[in-house]
Image (cartoon, grey):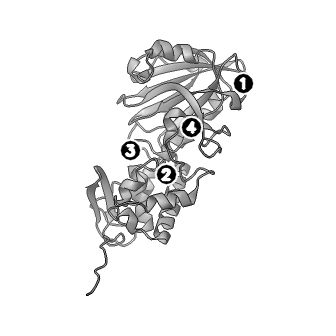
Amino acid sequence: MPELPEVETVRAGLEPFVVGATVADVEVFRDSCVRLLPGGPEEFQSRLLGATIMGAVRRGKFLWMPVAFPSVPPHPELAVESLSAHLGMSGQFRVHAADEVPAPHPHCRARLSLRREGRVHVLDFLDQRTFGYLNVEPLVPTADASPGGQGSDLAAVPSSVAHIGRDPLDPACDDPTILRGWRRGQRAIKQVLLDQTVASGIGNIYADEALWHARIHPERPASALSAPQSRALLDAARTVMSDALVAGGTSFDALYVNVNGESGYFERGLEAYGRGGLACSRCGSTMRRATVGGRATHWCARCQRRWAPRRVSR
């Protein structure tokens, strides 16, 4: 599933094409891609036609576009709904100029025609595995009155994102809240990193990478992390995701691409994820692979030593 760097790559690619554009036409080719709307494709179309897209916004792995309607002056603070997109396992957006629009791809689930400054672009939503979806939903105020996410100053998020924590690259991220959350409970720290309500955007790939960089075993209980270790882990998460952003994200196959269909290349720089059985680039030991919390997990047994509680001598 795409993680923060992959979704941010998509968001940044969408921004110059969608911001300020009016939705001139909507086509839905597979009803399940708008399955959260009771009225299906007809409701999706009626709630978007004529709307002006005010931004392309991301929090963690979650992507949305605030929309305003003709009856509302087109100012971001007055946008009352959101075109939300969940990319699932294989969701992609592709942008085409009006004079270069191909026939819908076999995996195209919805197509929007966008008009801005006299020019028309077509925005396709592709999803091979069909786990992703589009939705139109209300925006709700953020709990901390700060902007909802990267790409907008509007202090609001889609209702479906209200419970999601801020991500480590968010300027409004509250580090002490994340650090406390990561040190709470007996779950393995790998599982805690994947909990999007604590800190969002970190998935299986970047959890393994951050733990390797911070030299923390993935099965270490969260409560056994020291304050310096949790700080090092947050710093590592920021570093690996920032580096991945520069590389355009991690693409293992054609399902992970930007709005121009181009793959990212951060997989070349992975130190832990997918490297079970290979030599650790730091110490030369053989990297391990196991399942933690139902997820494939990779680590170095020498650099990331397993934690054991101290025995109290009698």
Q: Amino acid at mark 3?
A: Phe
Q: Amino acid at mark 4?
A: Arg
- In this rendering, which labeled residue sits more in front, label 4 or label 2? 2
- SS for callout 2: loop
Residue 105: image quadrant is top left
Which residue is denoted by mark 4 in the rendering?
11
- SS for callout 1: loop
- SS for callout 3: loop
Judging depth in this view, the residue of 200 and 272 nearest the camera is 200
- In this rendering, which labeled residue sits more in front, label 3 or label 4? 4
Which residue is denoted by mark 1 in the rendering?
74
Residue at point 38% right, 68% down?
224
Which residue is denoted by mark 3 in the rendering?
252
- In this rendering, which labeled residue sits more in front, label 4 or label 1? 1
Q: Quadrant of the C terminus?
A: bottom left
Mark drawn on residue 241: none
Residue at point 53% right, 50% down?
167
Sequence order check, earlier mark of 2 and 3: 2
Q: Tell me the CA gap for discs 3 and 4.
A: 20 Å
Q: Tell me the CA gap for discs 4 and 2.
A: 19 Å
Judging depth in this view, the residue of 300 and 174 nearest the camera is 174
The picture places residue 286, in percent across and down from the top left corner, at 28, 67
Label 3: how many residues lie within 10 Å, few (<14), some (14-19) or many (20+)? few
Q: Is residue 85 visible?
A: yes
Residue 138: image quadrant is top right
Which residue is denoted by mark 2 in the rendering?
199
Label 4: how many residues lie within 10 Å, few (<14), some (14-19) or many (20+)? many
Sequence order check, earlier mark of 3 and 1: 1
Q: Tell me the CA gap for discs 3 and 1.
A: 40 Å
